[in-house]
Image (cartoon, rainbow, N blue to C red):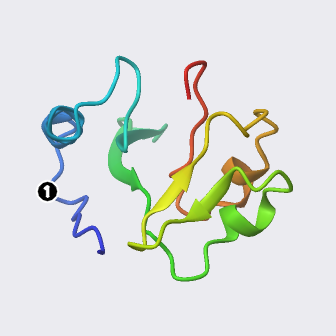
């Protein structure tokens, strides 16, 4: 599934992030979708843009290939999942993801 996010319409309200959190019954501080805020300092006035950071469920995910502990895998239903018991927090997957969708939290 591809995310259809048009940043020109995004106000940064994070309602989509909250709806995703509630829909998936995630624990506090865990998100499958994040809204990134980018501020560019312009001479006249600062420019703020918003973009959605979400897993694109790639067919050949580089985050999976980057994990030497096999903590990330493609589930049989196609979902890219992280096994918290195997993950050691090395951050290789977060650096490999071109969509900045992987984040590691204390509770994973």
Q: How crowded is mark 1: few (under 14 residues within 10 Å), some or many (20 or more)?
A: few
Residue at horizontal 23 percent and vertical 63 percent from the top? 5
**Quadrant into which the N terminus falls:** bottom left
Q: Is residue 58 above or below residue 91?
A: below
Q: In which quarter of the image is residue 16?
A: top left
- Number of labelled discs? 1
Q: What residue do we see at 32% from left, 47% from top?
A: 50
What residue appears at the point 68 percent right and 64 percent down from the top-left corner? 64
Q: Which of 15 and 49 is in front in this view?
A: 15
Left or right placement of residue 63 versus residue 92 in this view = left
Apparent side of residue 43 relative to residue 73 in the rendered image (left or right)? left
| Residue occupying the point 79% across, 56% down | 67
Coordinates of residue 59 in the picture (x, y in percent):
52, 82
Q: Relative to residue 8, is residue 87 depicted above or below?
A: above
Percent position of residue 85, x then y: 67, 34
Of all residues, the one furthest to the bottom in this rendering is 59
Does residue 92 sit above or below 23 in this rendering?
A: below
Circle 1 is placed at which residue position? 9
Residue sitting nearer the eye, 47 or 88: 88
- Residue 62 percent coordinates (x, y): 69, 70
Q: In this view, does 91 lie above or below 73?
A: above
Q: Position of residue 70 (x, y in %)?
A: 76, 56
Q: Is residue 58 left or right of residue 69?
A: left
Q: Which of 59 and 48 is in front in this view?
A: 59
The image quarter containing residue 30 is top left
Q: Circle 1 — which element?
A: loop
């Amino acid at each position: 599934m591809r995310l259809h996010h048009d940043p020109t319409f995004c106000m940064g309200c994070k309602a989509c992030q909250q709806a995703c959190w509630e829909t998936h019954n995630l624990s506090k501080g865990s998100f499958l979708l994040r809204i990134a805020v980018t501020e560019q300092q312009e001479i006249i006035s600062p420019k703020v843009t918003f973009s959605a950071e979400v897993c694109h469920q790639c067919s050949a995910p580089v985050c999976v290939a980057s994990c030497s502990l096999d903590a990330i895998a493609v589930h049989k239903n196609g979902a890219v999942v992280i096994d918290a018991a195997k993950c050691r927090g090395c951050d290789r997957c977060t650096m490999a993801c071109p969509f900045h969708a992987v984040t590691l939290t204390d509770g994973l």
